[in-house]
Image (cartoon, rainbow, N blue to C red):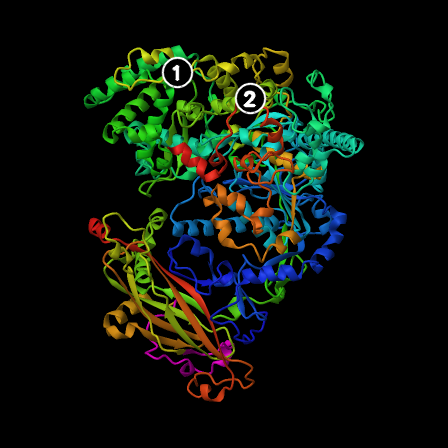
């Protein structure tokens, strides 16, 4: 007891303690020309000029100082097991949403404070901060981060778009960047340093979807050996006798994550669509033999439906997964919902079986054994999970097989290309850049390239579709969506393709695989570090400006952020805090811009101005597609 | 999980009443007492999430070297001396002399203490020879490795990129200044344009092929005809030639796919957190991992966010664990420990039974808990840290909503009914002042309200408790059970509803009165007189959340039986 306890003085605010939150704000006003700030200036000798670069993902954060080639620290934002900090959708129930926001805020605060105090060991008062944001990061999250940072007295915060930074990290300012993160994959064309935001394309096929798909596959096809009951049993009882289906409890988030990051890879595409289809039919027939007799009828369905596009096939996979793990339920799509629930269970089992046997045939990947913590401690030692090789190789197929509602990664890229002016297409198609953590899967980028080519080769839907699908509702007339892109085929090149295919054009040869060997996951951070070193890291929000708005900015506006409709969007006259944050969906037009209508339709980015008027054929996208939370709902329906 | 008491810090909400404990976010408002601070100026509790933090010194946790702040950044926040972590198990590595080469006659030649030296992990037996790192001398290892770090491909590539963009930015700035009054530049400096965009804003003026010009004034009309030929524009960046291209990189691509395809053991591939810090494409294999320099720690002083008074300030020296200033909450607020007698009793019995058994059986947690539809007693053990006697009043915040998410089929009014009821003594009760042990003259000063035999103290024997509990009259479970030195044990009772689920967690307001600035030392035990004598009585109150653990639903119990 080094400190003599003295009686606490004064009971000023016993029942109503003054809220430190407001105190903090006030004090930051007072200390604007704060002594702290001036005294820490002397540290400039030691490089206070370098900014703090934060790449806050929904799951993984990368932090470090600008001017360095790699981040100082990388960490899980909410612990290893925890879910993502934010999701693609917010709850609609106001009570629950309040709670959700509160959770997000405390977690963000915890992360941001630990960036300064644990990861970088630096004083927040002395460092400007660059936040790397994905273009569709909801405003309320940005606002929250800015508020927390300013509460911790950082001198300035700037937001920089991750896609542009990724391009900078490979030494370019023009390219089509696709960022495969955890929640979604976002393709954004950038021309001459200007992101063409209205041409953004997203798909929820990303890390999280891969995780849940992998979990569904493991639950069905992996084998679990519980620990032997006694040491002698380990020798005497053959492993085959102990083998069981995988209990869901064994597949903790941690285990699935480890399998995803340590065992999975992306195999090359299966040869051709025709052969694939044929194989698949055969596999479906084979699957009928092995499954129970009761599912014979369903198997006929399988045969009938197997002629449908691969997309439908995948959708039932996800509906199956929905029944296996409840986490999957958010992403059930329309097709799964419309089908009869009872039969869909059996049918999708059949589908998965068919899928399994087909992939098994093609896979040479080795089966892996993994030690896992058993459900309950009944025997000795750890349980064993046997992961079939084909799951390791083919789990990521889910990312390359989109459906009507959720376009695959290749389709996302092609859709973005379709939206940009014809003259830019060749340039952008030959400088595709893949970034993001999901792209770290070995073989991912080469596969993406071949998928792009394949989508261009295959006229969708395949001709066999109309022939004998009597049970199906009539399909749409044939529509070759990407026909206009087909001439570009020889020009497609992925800049950071580690093993580019033989180039078919001079342009592709000059670009494919020519990027520096930064890892895809780190591109955005390296770009942020570069931008900080070049002192161009996005427009700054200075603390003084933020604090000035402190009194007027009321929280209710901020929370109503995404409920804001178009009229509100144009009529917000009162200054509020989120208004001083850069936001491409809302930024005012420069003088002389056509009209406010264009602003409503969300085409305010500088580059878009040059592009929009000249391409009237491109319909202006509805404003909802720029609203993060709403775009989800449009996907779901 | 053991029952716990956490203390509320009001920093997260604007109201003084803490959030209901069943909300997951509420767990961030409550902290263990030992992590809290107390600001004397504001008379308020402060937690680690609201204090402002300043670094007072940096040191290496392994060698305890104090690193001057000037060199911290250059050393990348890591120890630049001899401290390394094992890449596999994060244990500290030891620099040991490598096995000397055996001479032909089987005898060890040369002295043992001569180089080369290697890094060796005492835990997992990793050594740096595996990745081909040996050292000439056993000191300054980081400096010896520095040359590798300086020539790391990522930093070289980064410098090249920087030069590349520097040149481009200079060029475009130059171009911008010569163009002079180009309208785009004035606008692009507005707050809402991205300044990376602004940096390249010269590009805006560029004739994008096939795209109509946004500002025709800025362009001469004859540009239109051969726009495509004007590829050499000032915004057109010269092509960047990578120092080492990704297609030529050592790792990644087909090689990794092949490696993964033939993978035999999961452990051959390094885990995500072992490789995620590298920004350069490198091998995925565990055997290629490099030793990690140990990250520095910092000693921090913390200030109250409201009045910026220092709450805690450590001594500068890294070897010292003392503090110059230490205003921790445990010196101001009574400490509370909650005990569930029936659980403790069951645990001790289990321990006794398992005494002779194997270790594996001990891993089983005793499944003693609180079953829905029954009532239990619990004890709060309050300790007074002050040198003055205090009087404490406890009041339980009503639980409004069911702790469990409403199940389908359960009627809403049923779900709304509080799942449990708490009874605690509502009257004030005293706790004697803290004093050094020798100041307690006799045991009678630490009298018990009940017999001293009552086995409630933490170290009491189980058998006794059982006996006493059986023999004890029912009403005695609620109220002050025992007073001893500066500790008072208060009993409470909890009645759990039949349909209850979730866990028993409730907010409890603790308010205590104390005499402030009273020079006369109080006589311990004399509680009655002090109210009348003391001129200045002050009250402080704070919220706590008491977590008694999960409720076991009834069905489960039946199944177990």
Q: Nearer the viewer, residue B530 or B238?
A: B238
Q: For numbered disc 2, what is the local secondary structure?
A: loop
Is B428 colored magenta in this rendering? no
Give the crowd class for mark 1: few <14, some 14-19, many >=20 residues within 10 Å: some
Viewer-side label of 1, 2 = 1
Chain bearing mark 2: B
- The magenta span reads B430-458
Q: Are marks 1 and 2 in contact (CB under 8 Å)?
A: no
The answer to whether one can see residue A473 in this image is yes
Residue on which the image places disc 1 = A461
Find residue B127 and report its image quarter.
top right
Find residue A208 and report its image quarter.
top left
Q: Is residue A80 left or right of residue A547?
A: left
Residue on which the image places disc 2 = B253
Q: Does residue B66 lie above or below A482 as drawn?
A: below
Q: Do circles 1 and 2 both sit on a common chain?
A: no
Q: Does residue B510 lie above or below A41 as drawn?
A: below
Residue B262 drawn at (x, y percent)? 47, 21
Q: Nearer the viewer, residue B530 or B458?
A: B530
Residue A533 drawn at (x, y percent)? 70, 38
Q: Is residue A269 left or right of residue B356?
A: right
The residue lying at 35 percent from left, 75 percent from top is B426
The residue lying at 59 percent from left, 27 percent from top is A613
Q: Nearer the viewer, residue A437 or B197?
A: B197
Mark-to-mark CA distance, 1 and 2 = 31 Å
């Amino acid at each position: 007891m080094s400190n003599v306890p003295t009686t606490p003085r004064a009971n000023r605010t016993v029942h109503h303690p003054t809220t430190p939150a407001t105190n903090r704000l006030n004090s930051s006003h007072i200390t604007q020309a704060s002594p702290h700030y001036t005294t820490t200036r002397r540290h400039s000798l030691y490089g206070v000029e370098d900014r703090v670069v934060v790449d806050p993902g929904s799951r993984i954060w990368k932090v470090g100082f600008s001017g360095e080639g790699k981040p100082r620290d990388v960490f899980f934002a909410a612990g290893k097991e925890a879910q993502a900090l934010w999701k693609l959708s917010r709850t609609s129930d106001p009570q629950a949403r309040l709670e959700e926001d509160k959770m997000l805020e405390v977690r963000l605060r915890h992360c941001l404070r630990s960036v300064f105090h644990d990861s970088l060991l630096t004083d927040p008062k002395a460092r400007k901060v660059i936040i790397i944001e994905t273009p569709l990061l909801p405003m309320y999250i940005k606002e929250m981060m800015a508020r927390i940072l300013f509460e911790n007295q950082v001198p300035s915060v700037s937001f920089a778009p991750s896609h542009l930074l990724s391009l900078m990290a490979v030494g370019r300012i023009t390219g089509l960047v696709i960022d495969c993160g955890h929640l979604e994959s976002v393709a954004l064309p950038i021309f001459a340093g200007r992101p063409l935001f209205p041409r953004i394309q997203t798909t929820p096929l990303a890390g999280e979807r891969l995780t849940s798909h992998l979990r569904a596959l493991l639950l069905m096809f992996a084998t679990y050996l519980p620990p032997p009951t006694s040491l002698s049993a380990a020798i005497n009882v053959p492993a085959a006798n102990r083998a069981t289906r995988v209990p869901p409890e064994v597949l903790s988030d941690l285990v699935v994550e480890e399998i995803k990051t340590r065992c999975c890879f992306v195999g090359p595409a299966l040869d051709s669509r025709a052969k694939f289809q044929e194989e698949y039919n055969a596999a479906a027939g084979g699957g009928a033999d092995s499954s129970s007799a009761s599912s014979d009828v369903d198997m006929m369905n399988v045969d009938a439906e197997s002629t449908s596009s691969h997309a439908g096939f995948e959708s039932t996979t996800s509906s199956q997964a929905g029944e296996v793990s409840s986490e999957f339920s958010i992403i059930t799509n329309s097709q799964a919902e419309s089908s009869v629930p009872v039969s869909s269970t059996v049918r999708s089992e059949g589908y998965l079986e068919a899928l399994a046997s087909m992939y098994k045939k093609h896979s040479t990947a080795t089966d892996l054994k993994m030690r896992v913590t058993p459900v309950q401690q009944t025997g000795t030692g750890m349980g064993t999970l046997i992961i079939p090789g084909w799951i390791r190789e083919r789990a990521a197929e889910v990312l390359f097989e989109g459906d009507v509602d959720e376009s695959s990664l290749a389709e996302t890229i092609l859709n973005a290309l379709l939206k940009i002016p014809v003259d830019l297409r060749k340039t952008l198609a030959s400088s595709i850049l893949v970034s993001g953590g999901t792209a770290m899967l070995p073989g991912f980028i080469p596969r993406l390239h071949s998928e792009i080519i394949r989508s261009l080769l295959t006229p969708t839907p395949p001709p066999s579709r109309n022939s004998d699908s009597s049970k199906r509702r009539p399909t749409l007339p044939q529509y070759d969506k990407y026909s206009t892109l087909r001439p570009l085929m020889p020009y497609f090149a992925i800049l950071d393709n580690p093993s580019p295919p033989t180039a078919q054009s001079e342009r592709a040869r000059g670009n494919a695989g020519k990027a520096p060997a930064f890892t895809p996951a780190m591109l955005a951070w390296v770009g942020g570090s570069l931008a900080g070193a070049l002192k161009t890291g996005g427009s700054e929000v200075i603390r003084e400006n933020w604090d000035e708005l402190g009194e007027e900015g009321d929280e209710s506006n901020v929370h109503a952020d995404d409920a804001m409709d178009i009229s509100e969007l144009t009529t917000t006259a009162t200054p509020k805090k989120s208004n001083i944050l850069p936001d491409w969906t809302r930024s005012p037009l420069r003088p002389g811009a056509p009209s406010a209508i264009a602003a409503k339709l969300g085409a305010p980015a500088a580059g878009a101005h040059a592009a929009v008027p000249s391409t009237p054929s491109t319909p202006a996208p509805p404003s909802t597609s720029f609203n993060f939370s709403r775009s989800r709902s449009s996907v779901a329906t | 999980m053991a029952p716990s008491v956490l203390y509320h810090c009001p920093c997260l909400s604007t109201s003084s009443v803490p959030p209901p404990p069943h909300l997951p976010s509420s767990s961030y408002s409550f902290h263990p007492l030992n992590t809290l601070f107390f600001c004397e100026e504001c008379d308020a509790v402060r937690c680690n999430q609201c204090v402002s933090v300043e670094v007072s010194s940096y040191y290496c946790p392994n060698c305890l070297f104090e690193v001057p702040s000037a060199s911290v950044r250059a050393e990348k926040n890591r120890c630049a001396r001899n401290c390394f972590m094992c890449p596999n198990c994060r244990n500290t590595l030891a620099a040991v002399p490598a096995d000397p080469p055996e001479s032909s006659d089987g005898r060890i030649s040369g002295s043992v203490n001569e180089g080369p030296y290697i890094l060796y992990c005492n835990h997992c037996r990793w050594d740096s020879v595996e990745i081909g790192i040996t050292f000439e001398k056993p000191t300054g290892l980081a400096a010896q490795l520095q040359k590798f770090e300086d020539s790391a491909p990522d930093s070289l590539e980064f410098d090249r990129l920087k030069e590349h963009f520097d040149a481009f930015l200079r060029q475009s700035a130059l171009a911008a200044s010569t163009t002079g009054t180009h309208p785009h530049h004035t606008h692009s400096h507005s707050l809402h344009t991205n300044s990376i965009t602004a940096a390249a804003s010269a590009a805006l003026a560029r004739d994008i092929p096939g795209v109509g010009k946004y500002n025709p004034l800025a362009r001469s009309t004859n540009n239109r005809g051969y726009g495509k030929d004007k590829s050499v524009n000032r915004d057109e960046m010269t092509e960047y030639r990578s120092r080492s291209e990704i297609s030529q990189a050592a790792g990644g691509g087909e090689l990794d796919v092949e490696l993964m395809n033939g993978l035999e053991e999961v452990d051959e591939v390094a885990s995500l957190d072992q490789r995620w810090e590298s920004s350069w494409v490198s091998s995925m294999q565990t055997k290629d991992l490099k030793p990690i320099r140990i990250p520095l720690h910092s000693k921090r002083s913390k200030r109250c966010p409201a009045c910026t008074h220092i709450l805690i300030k450590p001594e500068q020296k890294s070897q010292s664990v003392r503090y110059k200033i230490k205003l921790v909450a445990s010196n101001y607020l009574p400490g509370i420990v909650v005990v569930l007698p029936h659980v403790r009793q069951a645990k001790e019995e289990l321990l006794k039974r398992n005494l002779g058994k194997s270790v594996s059986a001990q891993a089983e947690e005793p499944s003693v808990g609180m079953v829905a539809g029954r009532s239990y007693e619990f004890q709060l053990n309050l300790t007074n840290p002050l040198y003055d006697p205090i009087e404490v009043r406890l009041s339980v915040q009503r639980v409004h909503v069911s702790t469990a998410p409403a199940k389908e089929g359960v009627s809403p009014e049923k779900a709304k009914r509080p799942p449990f009821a708490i009874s605690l003594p509502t009257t004030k009760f005293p706790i004697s002042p803290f004093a050094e042990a020798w100041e307690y003259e006799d045991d009678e000063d630490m009298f018990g309200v009940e017999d001293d035999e009552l086995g409630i103290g933490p170290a009491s024997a189980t058998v006794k408790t059982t006996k006493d509990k059986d023999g004890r009259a029912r009403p005695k479970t609620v109220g002050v059970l025992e007073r001893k030195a500066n500790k008072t044990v208060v009993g409470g009772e909890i009645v759990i509803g039949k349909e209850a689920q979730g866990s028993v967690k409730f907010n409890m307001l603790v308010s205590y009165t104390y005499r402030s600035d009273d020079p006369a030392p109080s006589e311990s035990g004399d509680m009655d007189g002090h109210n009348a004598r003391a001129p200045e009585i002050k009250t402080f109150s704070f919220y706590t959340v008491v977590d008694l653990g999960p409720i076991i639903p009834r069905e489960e119990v039946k199944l177990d039986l």
